[in-house]
Image (spheres, coloured by chain):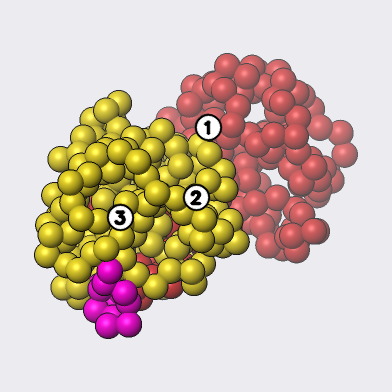
Chain colours: A red, B yellow
Amino acid sequence: MYEGAVQDLIDELGRLPGVGPKSAQRIAFHLLQIDGPDAQRLADAITRVKDTIRFCARCWNVSEAEECRICQDPRRDPAVLCVVEEPRDVLAIERTREYRGRYHVLGGAISPIDGVGPEELHIRELLARVGEEPVEELIIATNPNVEGEATASYLSRLLTHHDVRVTRLASGLPVGGDLDYADEVTLGRAFVGRRELGA
Amino acid sequence: MYEGAVQDLIDELGRLPGVGPKSAQRIAFHLLQIDGPDAQRLADAITRVKDTIRFCARCWNVSEAEECRICQDPRRDPAVLCVVEEPRDVLAIERTREYRGRYHVLGGAISPIDGVGPEELHIRELLARVGEEPVEELIIATNPNVEGEATASYLSRLLTHHDVRVTRLASGLPVGGDLDYADEVTLGRAFVGRRELGA
């Protein structure tokens, strides 16, 4: 065992996604060896993100205000909503510059194995928006994997009797992967070729 | 680009060893989504490690006091010094329970490609200890790779005219790897089978 403070840091780092015990140890010693202010910048960035960032009250994207920048932007088309799993997917789609509508972040995808059902996602809030906002099209941009497809089918069935067009991003995205790993061209083309989703 | 605080956190995380841009993004969103106190524990652990941990004035291991626990322990044999590259190597060797001497942490290995020469390592301090302390044997436990071997040869030549036995950990350690990845049995055997190092 290391001296208390070092072991505590290794333990905390080891709880991060994708950081195993050996990586945690390497990162801890890296932090020990760099200058104090450089390490403190990371500590402060963590504190600050928790203090200043919340989720947009409308679309559940990350936000520093009650509503996120995109929801506040009057130039974004309120008739089109793009439904994604995570805030990082919003960024991936923004990078394509193909999309001028708004978003709705579900906070994940339906996955019975992980205990994530429809009630764990922001689907109720999505239905409320479809009722209250002038939404004409819903582009379902969940990941092209099992959970994302299941979520897309679920939403499509749920919205059958609503007066809204439900589309799904075109294939062209590599199947089995994560949306936010796609390059801009592929993702942009998937937007252009989006198809109607049958119930 | 994300809202400022999120991007700042991603940037800081991306500076850690072994954390690429995608990992940094995933870790940042993980920190955003967990409870405030859980995230704060990581931030505090970083601050605390920088506030409380320094390097042992004698052996350059990590320490909460002027001298580390091992140097302060009167049961450790002062006649044997084990020379390692990094503090994490001390822990790896302690786990074998084969070693009852003391340590000297060089802070790296000689590597001209990375601009690390002997003067960047704690070699001058090692020579001072050999002169001042009752050291009879120096076990060179640098990594069994190119840099570690070069450092071992350098030290061996440097100590030719000192009245001290210089040994090197036995092979048995997988060549080309890092010392702290070895299992306890392999590392323990390497201690038992250590060999005399000719100049």
> In the image, what residue occupies the spot 74% across and 60% down?
A114
Up/down of B1 relative to B36, above or below? above
Residue type at numbered disc 2: Ala
C-alpha separation, residue under disc 1 versus residue under disc 2: 52 Å
Name the side, left or right, on which B170 lies relative to A109.
Answer: left
x then y, percent, for residue B110: 28, 37
Badge nearest the viewer, 3 or 2: 3
State if disc 2 and disc 1 touch (CB < 8 Å).
no
Q: Which residue is mark 1?
A: A92
x then y, percent, for residue B190: 52, 55
Q: Is residue B194 visible?
A: yes
C-alpha separation, residue under disc 3 versus residue under disc 2: 15 Å
> In the image, what residue occupies the spot 38% across and 66% down?
A9
Residue type at numbered disc 1: Ala
Q: Quadrant of the C terminus of chain A?
A: top right
How packed mark 1 is, by other alpha carbons closer than 10 Å (few <14, some 14-19, many 20 or more), is some
Q: Nearer the viewer, residue A36 or A132?
A: A36
Quarter-wise, where is residue A186 in the image?
top right
Name the side, left or right, on which A70 lies relative to A121.
Answer: left
Quarter-wise, where is residue A150 in the image?
top right
x then y, percent, for residue A103: 56, 40
Query: Same chain, marks 3 and 2?
Result: yes
Membership of B120 in magenta stretch = no
State if disc 2 and disc 3 touch (CB < 8 Å).
no
Badge nearest the viewer, 1 or 2: 2
Residue type at numbered disc 3: Arg
x then y, percent, for residue B115: 23, 30
Q: Which residue is mark 2?
A: B170
Q: Which residue is mark 3?
A: B165
